[in-house]
Image (spheres, helix red, strand yellow):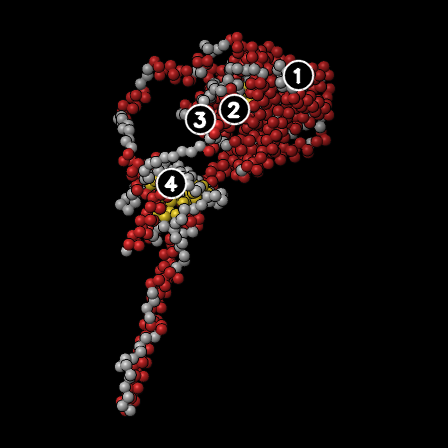
Amino acid sequence: MECAQEHEEYPVQTQMYSVERPIYNQELLQEQLHQREKPSQPLSQRIAHSCRCTSKKAKSHLYSFLPILLWLPRYPVKAYLLGDIISGISTGVMQLPQGLAYALLAAVPPVFGLYSSFYPVFLYTFFGTSRHISIGTFAVISMMVGAVAVREVPDERFDIPELNSTNSTEIRDDLRVQVAVTLALLSGIIQLCLGLLRFGFVAIYLTEPLVRGFTTAAAVHVFTSQLKYLLGVKTKRYSGALSVLYSIYAVFSNITDTNIAALVVGLTCIVLLLIGKEINVRFKNKLPVPIPMEIIVVIIGTGVSAGMNLSDTYGVHIVGTIPKGLRAPAIPDMGIIQQVFIDAIAIAIVGFSMAVSMAKIFALKHGYTVDGNQELIALGICNSVGSFFQTFPITCSMSRSLVQESTGGKTQVAGTLSSIMVLLVIVAIGYLFEPLPQTVLAAIVMVNLKGMFKQFADIPHFWRTSKIELAIWVIAFLASVFLGLDYGLLTAVAFAMITVIYRTQSPQYRILGQIPSTDVYCDVDTYDEVKECPGIKIFQANASLYFANSELYLNALKKKTGVDPCAILAAKKKAQKRHASEMKQADECKKKAVLKLTSDVETSVKHEIANDELPLNGKFASADANAQDTSPAELERFMEPMGKVHSLILDFTPVNFVDSVGAKTLKSVIKEYEEIGVGVYISGCSGPVVDDLTRLKFFEKSITRDLLFHSVHDAVLTCQLKAVSVSQAALNH
């Protein structure tokens, strides 16, 4: 009860604390602390220990590689099964039309989109660690695959008079399938290797503004590529730099050939899809499951096309033949690995980045963890193994993942059920979708891009929050739109790295002051209450000290503190030189005055002797005003005023590391300021920074660990005590 009353009487913000301790520098602190001895093992023993296999270690590695062994035996059937069934059916209903649609983006026949919606999804159940993401076809990855396939197998190669259009189309499609399958194999191997080498951290280099700008640009590519299907016109498919502009120009050049029936069907589907999605958003709390508008549109479109014979009557392009059953495994074409290797790297990294970002969002929401390295392994297995069954590269789909999570999905069982639904279509009823107009698939793709186009709202957001992140977004978008997705991504990553260098080279520099009667130090330019300690300058930079910013650090230090040792020493030399010049002129004037005086005296003496006259005092005035010595105090007027600064404290609290160039810069700072009588101290060094300085042999006879202090306040108290002792010594002297 008493404690509660005290709590009410003294709120948290007014609680006080009092600590009495010595003033700690690094030397004193190390004397009072006892470092733990870490047992060192020979390299051979460490290698033997890491290679030793125990049952516990083998079990741990097995569970890590196959997470299904960990969660499936504990699967709560009564609590999870119903939700997973509903979620799996809902996601599978979306998986089917998106697989067909995204196959067009990948420039392969629609059935390969169904393959890519089955094998990888089923495999992910065994190896993935996320319970909610939906693996399979995705617009951005499909577009990247299609760009490579069209580049490697262009349409011009099949304009051969000897071949009829059907044969040439089949040959072209077979070759593009080989390109897509090889990309899946390569990207899968890259992801698998990165995962086994524990390189899951590579995704951090694809910062959120970069990914959002890149995916927005990919949406522009996808949208323009679908215009010809929506309008029902035949145009060449472009890839590479300026492909968006070429595609738009080609479509509008053939706008007079628009198939009105295809356009009407496509626009009708777009309207229905937008209405359905809006209903799902507005009434998501009232609907047990989202309305599956995509599959409804596919069914309606297929029925209308078959009933009205849109293909023969109105010339509407349809999906065409969908082979029944699964294909036998086949080895991808290894002869084109060299041509598509760089593209596979980009696809592997983008695919992993999209998957792991969505996985972490759901994991944070539902309170579990995902392993980035295992996700790489899972995606690598899905892509590489799937490539032997004619799948193209896959990743996580944002729209399907949101449906899978919102409809009650609890585990990877939901994904397995969705893949089984796709399997049933492949082996049993796939032929029913052969009359499906391609304009319906284009409508599905375009409407699914709505979420990506909403990312244009990032521009005002980043304008308000961070101009650098805005620049990353804009560069990623523009480069990907105009240079193509592959070179655009490379350009965006390079620019993002340049911004990292820029930020470390352009940190914020501050002069700190003390909040009166506390040990708290803040920026003096930010708060009115903060006051500088008399005679002490506290300098802070929010970046590490290394070769890229050491010179900038030194310049900022001199500018912010107002104490420039080089300028002061130069002024001192100039003053001494001027003083010597004046002394020399005074000596010359003195000599001339003496000679003149001697001559006048001799004449006067002769005259006085002649007239029997002598000086009254027997002495001669011999001093001239300019002949007096200049006082040493006069040197001060030749020097730029330094103020009364006697100590400089470098706050290293934000510093993470120091390299050899940074250590040399610190040494030069200490020596330069010592020459003008200003002591330099360093505060807030972390253990790794002290280790860096020790390894770089920063500490020597003139620079000891006594200059390092545990905190800014310790350094300030030491400077004040030294200033008082120096003043007393001067008074006693």
Give the mark toward the camera: 3 or 4. 4
Relative to 144, say whether 691 is above or below.
below
Give the mark toward the camera: 2 or 4. 4
Amino acid on which the number 2 mark rests in the picture? Ile
Asked if one can make out residue 669 in the rendered structure from this viewpoint, the answer is no
**Towards the viewer: 244 or 510:** 510
Q: Secondary structure at mark 1?
A: helix
Amino acid on which the number 4 mark rests in the picture? His
Which residue is at 60% across, 27% downward? Answer: 451
Mark found first going from the N terminus, 2 or 3: 3
Asked if one can make out residue 140 in the rendered structure from this viewpoint, the answer is yes
Q: Which residue is mark 4?
A: 713
Amino acid on which the number 3 mark rests in the picture? Gly
Q: Secondary structure at mark 3?
A: helix
Q: Which mark is residue 296?
A: 1
Q: Which residue is mark 3?
A: 200
Please tell me how many numbered marks the rendered image carries. 4
> What whole-number distance in Å separates the C-alpha atoms at marks 3 and 4?
41 Å
Badge 2: residue crowd in 10 Å (few <14, some 14–19, many ≥20)? few
Q: Which mark is residue 361?
A: 2
Q: Position of residue 676 (x, y in %)?
A: 35, 53
> What whole-number distance in Å separates the C-alpha atoms at marks 2 and 1?
30 Å
Q: Quadrant of the N terminus?
A: top left
Give the mark toward the camera: 2 or 3. 2
Q: Position of residue 471 (x, y in %)?
A: 54, 38
Mark 2 and mark 4 in contact? Answer it, CB < 8 Å.
no
